[in-house]
Amino acid sequence: MAAAVALLLLSALSGAAAQVFPPWNGTFPMGPGFGGGSSGGGGAGSAAGTTGVPAMFVFGDSLTDNGNNNDLNSLAKANYPPYGIDFAGGPTGRFSNGYTMVDEIAQLLGLPLLPSHTDASSGDAALHGVNYASAAAGILDNTGQNFVGRIPFNQQIKNFEQTLDTLSHRLGGASKLAPSLARSIFYVGMGSNDYLNNYLMPNYNTRNEYNGDQYSTLLVQQYAKQLNTLYNLGARRFVIAGVGSMACIPNMRARSPVNMCSTDVDDLIIPFNNKVKAMVNSLNTNRPGAKFIYVDNYAMISQVLRSPWSYGFSVTDRGCCGIGRNRGMITCLPFLRPCLNRNAYIFWDAFHPTERVNVLLGTAAFNGGNDVVYPMNIQQLAAWQP
């Protein structure tokens, strides 16, 4: 969910302390690798070679972008420090201090970290999957246009078609590719920007054209068509990530003169998520050869915000890196000094969670219960037999 305030990225401003937290007592599974320092995620070694998933393909926005906007004429970029301060490769384009949620999922599936579409020009580079996510992208093509360059979901699907052509040539034809594609995971997380950087933006006319219910219906109808396109291209195992709660992100708090969360934002998101979950149920009924699962990011992040101490977090109301009230008025600028105790923070910048939260969410999506991932988790999806 790239932020509108990134339009202010016009000037640059001038070692994480390792911490170990006690075991959490919440409902999320405890994932290893939360102790601080550089990215390690949750141990890929425990799952490597056991899931049978040959590849993962990722479609989304800045929550999962790993560098697809780097070469675009775009204001939605994160390929500069301090982004990536806890990532072994430094700044890559990830809107995080380290791992994203899909990085953790890839590790738990026993896969390497995925290349961006920009970096996956060869068949060999794409053999284990590709990340097509783009900051500021949305379900609708016009979402995020304030940022100039971005890759909407429709274009991300077209980029995937390019990858299919490359892989088909590399593997000796579409018939040889199809079985591996059917066993691969397709992670899709869209919708945040369709609210933050479309419906809620004053320079868009969207709110005058649709009320909240009409707009969520429009989005989900388009979303279903896009997922059906992926299905027709050979995708069979889908992970559909719901939009997380945005009422209390630092930027929303920064807009309030009394540091309050903006419940109006979540009043829009909740109906959208409910319709996405209904869409998942419908697709499961009408696509018996495929399986769609819904990751309830809204429920997960809301639980962390309700009981942060249970998960080892002590700072909930501001970003680790940013400027102004709640470090959320202007997001993380180049070479801005971030907080030292990043593991204590829920939010990395004005809009995005820290690596610890990303790893937590990825682990919960991988092996959590039906209260957070429905009707099965990613580990079960990997083992699912049509």
Image (spheres, rainbow, N blue to C red):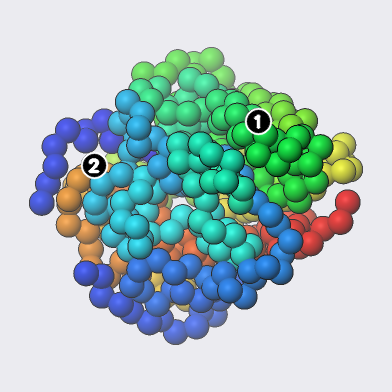
Q: Residue 347 is drawn in which quadrant?
A: bottom left
Residue at horizontal 77 percent and vertical 30 percent from the top: 232
The answer to whether residue 233 is left or right of residue 4 is right
Asked which secondary structure carries label 2, the reply is loop
* 174 and 358: which is toward the camera: 174
Residue position marked by numbered label 1 in the rendering: 165
Residue at horizontal 32 percent and vertical 47 percent from the top: 350
Residue 165 location in percent, x, y? 65, 30
What kind of residue is marked 2? Ile
Residue at horizontal 14 percent and vertical 42 percent from the top: 12
* 61 and 302: which is toward the camera: 61
Q: Which residue ends up furthest to the bottom in the rendered image?
A: 22
Which label was assigned to residue 330? 2
145 up-or-down from 131: above or below? above
What kind of residue is marked 1? Asp
Residue 258 location in percent, x, y? 27, 49
